Image: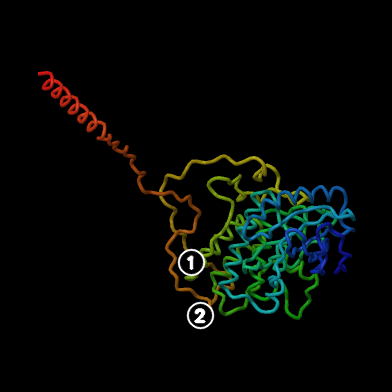
C-alpha cells in the first residue's frame, strides 16, 4: 500500500522546493542548500516507522555511508542530521536524470548499457559488503543516474535500520530472493547478489523476472512464482545466451548455486563483455591487495542480523585497517576463461544488435592487479665538483710581482 508523503520538515540552512517521492519508510524531498548553494535530495524517515533504536542505527549507518559514498557508483551523502520533528534525515546529491526504475519500464535498456551498469553497481555492492553493510533493496528504482550519466546506487542500509517489524514494508518483492520471502532473518550477501541479478534482468526484459504481463502480479502471486523458481527467458533476440547464462547463475533459487559475491557476478559480466567483443567496463572495489577484509565468498552460510549489517567477523572494521599483504611476485594473472554455456533454456540463437557491438579488441586480463613499474631504478652518479682556477692565477701573479719588486730593489741598491 502506497503511503502519502508527509509534510516536509523545516531544516536549518535549507529551503524546501518540492517532493521527489515516497516509499514505505521514508520520503525524499528536493531542497536548496544555502551554503554552499546547490540543490540536494533529502531523505527523511517517516514518523510512523522510527524509534530511539532506529535513530541510533540511522546515525551509525550515516557515518559508514559517508565513507562508502566516495565510491563512484554510490550516491554521495553530504551530511546527516535530526530535524526539529525528531526525524533523522540524509542530505544527498540530487540526481535529476530519470532513474532506471522509470527507464526500464519505458523501453528495454541496450545490452551494452545493461552490462556496464551491472559491472559498475556490482562494484558498489561489493564495496558495501566489505564494509559490513547489506543493501537489502536493490532494484532499478534505486539506481539513480548522475549528471555525468553514471549509475549510482542509493538507499544503502536504511531499510536495515528499521528492525524486523518494519523490514517487510521496505521489501521490494519483484527483486527479492526466495529465501528472503520465506524468512527475512536469513538475508545474506547472496540475497543482495540475487537482487542485483534480478535488476539487470529487468533492465533487459523491461519487466521483473517473474512478472507476467497482463497476469496476476500481486505480491502474493509473484512471491509464489519466485519461490517456485524456473526463471523465464528474457525474450529479446539481441540478448546473447552468454548474458542470460550469467544472470541465471545470480538468480539461482539456491543461495549456494549463485555467484559467490557481488564481485564474482561483476566479473562474470565482464567476461561476457570480453567474449562478445564489447568494451570491458572497469569494476571499482576496495583495493584487493591492500584493504581487503575477509572474503565474502563463503558468507552465504552466515545469516545477517535484522539491522542489515554483516557480523563483525565478516566485515572490514571501519576504523581498523586491514593487514597489508606483500606485493605479488608470481606470474601475471591468467586470461579469463571463456564463459560456460550450459543447457539453460535461454541459451538459444540470437540476433546481435549492430548498434551495440564494439570492435575494440580486449587484450588485458580483467582480474585486479597491483601495477608496478618494471624499469630499473636510476643509478645515482655523484656530480664532478670542479675547483675554481682563479686562486692559482692570483697566486702566480703575486709571486711574479714579488720577484719583480725584489729585482728592482736590487738594481737600485746596486
Distance Cα–Cα, label 2 vs label 1 = 16 Å
Is residue 388 found left or right of 11 in the rendered image?
A: left
Q: Which residue is mark 1?
A: 274
Mark 1 Cα shell of 10 Å, populated few (<14), some (14-19), many (≥20): many
- In the rendered view, tell whether residue 77 sits above or below residue 342: above
**Residue displayed at 67% across by 76% down:** 206
Residue at the farthest left position: 414
Q: Nearer the viewer, residue 391 or 256?
A: 391
Q: Compared with residue 375, is residue 412 higher up or lower down, i.e. above or below? A: above
Q: Which mark is residue 354?
A: 2
Residue occupying the point 52% across, 67% down: 272
| Callout 1: SS | helix
- Residue at the image point whose x is 90% and y is 56% from the top: 85
Whether residue 209 is visible:
no
- In the picture, residue 405 is in which quadrant? top left
- Coordinates of residue 114 in the picture (x, y in percent): 60, 70
Between 85 and 324, the residue placed more toward the observer is: 85
Residue 359 in the image: x percent, y percent?
A: 45, 73
* Residue 58 relative to residue 388: left or right: right
Side of 93 where 356 appears, left or right: left
Q: Give 76 or 405, whichever is nearer the viewer.
A: 405
Q: Position of residue 312 (x, y in %)?
A: 69, 43
Image quarter in which the C terminus is found: top left
Q: Is residue 228 left or right of residue 121?
A: right
Q: At which x and y percent is residue 126?
A: 62, 55
Amino acid at each position: 500500500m502506497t503511503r502519502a508523503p508527509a509534510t516536509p520538515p523545516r531544516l536549518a540552512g535549507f529551503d524546501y522546493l518540492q517532493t521527489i517521492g515516497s516509499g514505505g519508510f521514508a520520503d525524499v524531498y528536493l531542497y536548496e542548500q544555502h551554503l554552499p548553494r546547490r540543490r540536494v535530495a533529502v531523505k527523511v524517515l517517516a514518523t510512523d516507522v522510527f524509534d530511539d533504536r532506529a535513530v541510533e542505527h540511522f546515525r551509525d549507518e550515516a557515518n559508514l555511508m559517508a565513507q562508502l559514498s566516495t565510491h563512484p557508483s554510490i550516491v554521495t551523502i553530504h551530511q546527516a542530521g535530526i530535524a526539529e520533528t525528531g526525524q533523522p534525515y540524509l542530505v544527498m546529491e540530487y540526481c535529476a536524470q530519470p532513474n532506471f526504475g522509470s527507464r526500464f519500464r519505458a523501453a528495454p535498456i541496450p545490452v551494452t548499457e545493461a552490462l556496464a551498469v551491472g559491472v559498475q553497481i556490482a562494484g558498489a555492492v561489493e564495496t558495501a559488503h566489505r564494509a559490513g553493510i547489506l543493501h537489502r533493496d536493490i532494484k532499478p528504482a534505486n539506481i539513480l543516474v548522475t549528471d555525468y550519466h553514471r549509475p549510482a546506487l542509493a538507499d544503502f542500509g536504511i531499510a536495515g535500520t528499521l528492525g524486523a517489524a518494519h523490514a517487510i514494508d521496505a521489501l521490494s518483492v519483484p527483486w527479492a530472493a526466495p529465501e528472503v520471502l520465506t524468512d527475512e532473518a536469513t538475508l545474506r550477501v547472496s540475497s543482495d547478489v540475487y537482487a542485483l541479478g534480478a535488476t539487470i534482468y529487468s533492465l533487459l526484459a523491461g519487466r521483473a523476472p517473474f512478472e507476467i504481463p497482463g497476469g496476476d502480479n500481486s505480491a502474493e502471486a509473484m512471491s509464489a512464482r519466485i519461490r517456485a523458481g524456473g526463471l523465464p527467458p528474457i525474450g529479446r533476440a539481441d540478448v546473447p545466451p552468454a548474458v542470460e547464462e550469467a544472470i541465471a547463475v545470480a538468480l539461482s533459487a539456491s543461495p549456494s548455486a549463485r555467484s559467490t559475491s557481488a564481485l564474482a557476478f561483476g566479473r562474470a559480466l565482464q567476461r561476457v563483455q570480453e567474449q562478445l567483443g564489447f568494451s570491458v567496463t572497469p569494476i571499482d572495489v576496495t583495493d584487493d591487495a591492500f584493504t581487503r577484509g575477509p572474503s565474502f565468498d563463503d558468507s552465504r552460510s552466515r545469516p545477517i542480523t535484522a539491522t542489515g549489517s554483516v557480523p563483525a567477523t565478516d566485515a572490514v572494521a571501519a576504523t581498523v585497517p586491514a593487514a597489508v599483504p606483500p606485493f605479488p611476485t608470481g606470474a601475471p594473472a591468467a586470461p579469463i576463461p571463456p564463459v560456460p554455456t550450459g543447457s539453460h533454456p535461454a541459451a538459444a540463437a540470437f540476433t546481435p544488435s549492430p548498434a551495440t557491438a564494439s570492435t575494440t579488441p580486449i587484450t588485458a586480463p580483467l582480474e585486479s592487479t597491483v601495477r608496478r613499474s618494471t624499469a630499473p631504478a636510476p643509478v645515482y652518479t655523484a656530480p664532478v665538483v670542479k675547483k675554481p682556477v682563479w686562486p692559482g692565477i692570483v697566486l702566480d701573479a703575486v709571486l711574479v710581482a714579488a720577484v719583480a719588486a725584489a729585482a728592482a730593489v736590487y738594481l737600485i741598491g746596486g
